[in-house]
Amino acid sequence: MVQEIAPERRLGALGKMARRKRIFARLREGASYEEIAGEEGVSRERIRQIVSEVLQKRAVDSGADHAKLQLDRLTPVMQLAAEAIAGTAERFDVFSRIPHRDFPGGPLLRRPSLMLAMLYYRLRDLL
C-alpha cells in the first residue's frame, strides 16, 4: 500500500508577515541564518532572500536600518569587551585555557610565510 505525502501548505500574507517578524527578532537576538533556517524549516539561502527582500523594500534609510540590525547582533560581544575593559574578564578566561599550537617553523619563518600567503591570495584575487 502506497502512502501519499500531503504537500505542505504555503504561507498566506499574514503567515509571511509573521515569519518576517520572527526572523528579524531572532536576528536582533544574534541568531545565525542557519539557526533561524532550522527553526523555520527553510534553507539558509531562503532566510537570506527574505532578509534581502525586506531590506530592499524599505525606501527610507534601508542602509541605516541594516547597520542597526548588525549592531544589535554585536551587542553581546560589545558587552563582553566592556567587561574585559572594566577588569572583569572571567568569561575571557575560557579562551586562555584552550591549548594553542606554535607556528610550524618557529618565529624565523612566521613572517615570511605570512607574506607569501598574502601574496598568493592577492594574486589569486586579481586573476
Image (cartoon, rainbow, N blue to C red):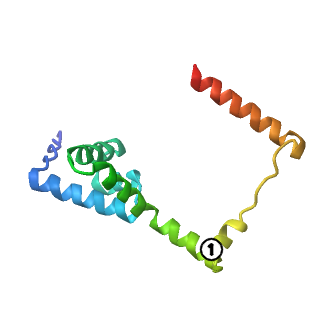
Residue at horizontal 35 percent and vertical 63 percent from the top? 28
Tell me, yes or no, if residue 67 can be seen here. Answer: yes
Left of 98 or right of it: where is 33? left
Left of 116 or right of it: where is 78? left
Look at the picture and state if 78 lies above or below 50.
below
The location of residue 10, given as percent across then percent down, is 13, 46
Q: Quadrant of residue 116?
A: top right
- Give the residue type that dot 1 points to: Ala
Residue with the mark numbered 1? 84
Residue at the top extreme, as displayed: 127
Tell me, yes or no, if residue 42 can be seen here. Answer: no
The location of residue 125, given as percent across then percent down, is 58, 26
Residue at horizontal 76 percent and vertical 35 percent from the top? 115
Residue at horizontal 81 percent and vertical 40 percent from the top? 111
Numbered-mark total: 1
Camera-side residue of 50 and 75: 75
Query: In the picture, which quadrant includes the N terminus?
Result: top left
The location of residue 79, given as percent across then percent down, is 51, 72
Camera-side residue of 25 and 112: 112
The location of residue 68, given as percent across then percent down, is 36, 59
- For label 1, the SS is helix
Camera-side residue of 58 and 27: 58
Q: Quadrant of residue 127?
A: top right
Crowdedness near tag 1: few (<14), some (14–19) or many (≥20) residues, C-alpha within 10 Å: some
